[in-house]
């Protein structure tokens, strides 16, 4: 069986739908997971969908993906702008990596304009709302077939 795509979510994304809905929308992370799993079926992919508020847990999932994952879609939340450790873990992963941000980080505070993860990501979606996860999954379908 083909290896799954890891969809990893960082801190505060467990509050999606409740947290600053004017920025992040009203859909919950469970809604996003359900939509991603539905689309994955259509695309003949499987996904492992995770969220953690802990940097080390996200790093452990990236390490797991080294053996068990075909690609990684990651919304690292605020760790995007701070975490060299997540960048290092992604640099130790050989498959495609796509970075997703629900909001358009470039339209926001200047500290959100820099992403460590973008130094590794093969593509970045920002400002497409939660639809960005689904667009990234479609792109991942192409990348894992290459
Ligand atoms: C985010 C943008 C980050 O700057 C922020 O810290 C988040 C969410 C997004 O999805 O738009 O937690 O990654």
Image (spheres, rainbow, N blue to C red):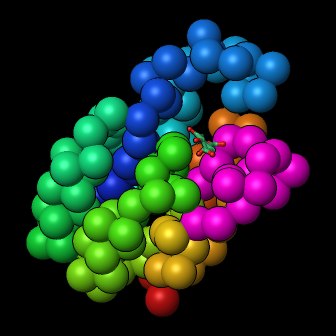
Ligand 1 shown in quarter: top right
As displayed, is residue 56 above or below residue 113? above
As displayed, is residue 40 above or below residue 30? below
Q: Considering depth in this image, is 47 or 58 the residue closer to the camera?
A: 58
Q: Considering depth in this image, is 19 or 38 the residue closer to the camera?
A: 19
Left or right, residue 110 beside residue 93: right
Decide if residue 124 is in sight here.
yes
Q: For residue 27, what is the image quadrant?
A: top right
Q: Considering depth in this image, is 63 or 53 the residue closer to the camera?
A: 53
Q: Residue at x 49, y 30 (%)?
A: 13
Decide if residue 61 is in sight here.
no
Q: Residue at x 68, y 42 (%)?
A: 102
Q: Residue at x 65, y 66 (%)?
A: 114
Q: Position of residue 35 (x, y in %)?
A: 55, 32
Q: For residue 124, what is the image quadrant?
A: bottom right
Report the span colored magenta.
Answer: 100-115
Q: Position of residue 17 (x, y in %)?
A: 62, 15
Left or right, residue 106 beside residue 14: right
Q: Considering depth in this image, is 111 or 115 the residue closer to the camera?
A: 111
As displayed, is residue 63 above or below residue 29? below
Q: Hey, which residue is sitting farthest bottom in the picture?
A: 146
Whether the magenta-drawn stretch holds residue 103 is answered as yes
Q: Hey, which residue is sitting farthest right in the picture?
A: 107
């Amino acid at each position: 069986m083909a290896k799954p795509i890891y969809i990893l979510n960082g801190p505060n994304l467990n509050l999606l739908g409740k947290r600053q809905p004017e920025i992040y929308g009203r859909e919950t992370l469970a809604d996003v997971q359900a939509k991603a799993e539905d689309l994955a079926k259509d695309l003949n992919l499987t996904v492992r969908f995770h969220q953690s508020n802990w940097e080390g847990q996200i790093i452990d999932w990236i390490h797991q993906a080294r053996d068990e994952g075909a690609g990684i879609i990651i919304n690292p939340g605020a760790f995007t702008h701070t975490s060299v450790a997540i960048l290092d873990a992604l640099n130790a992963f050989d498959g495609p990596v796509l970075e997703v941000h629900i909001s358009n980080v470039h339209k926001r505070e200047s500290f959100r304009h820099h992403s460590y993860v973008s130094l590794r990501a093969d593509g970045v979606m920002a400002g497409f709302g939660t639809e960005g996860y689904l667009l990234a999954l479609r792109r991942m379908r192409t990348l894992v077939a290459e």
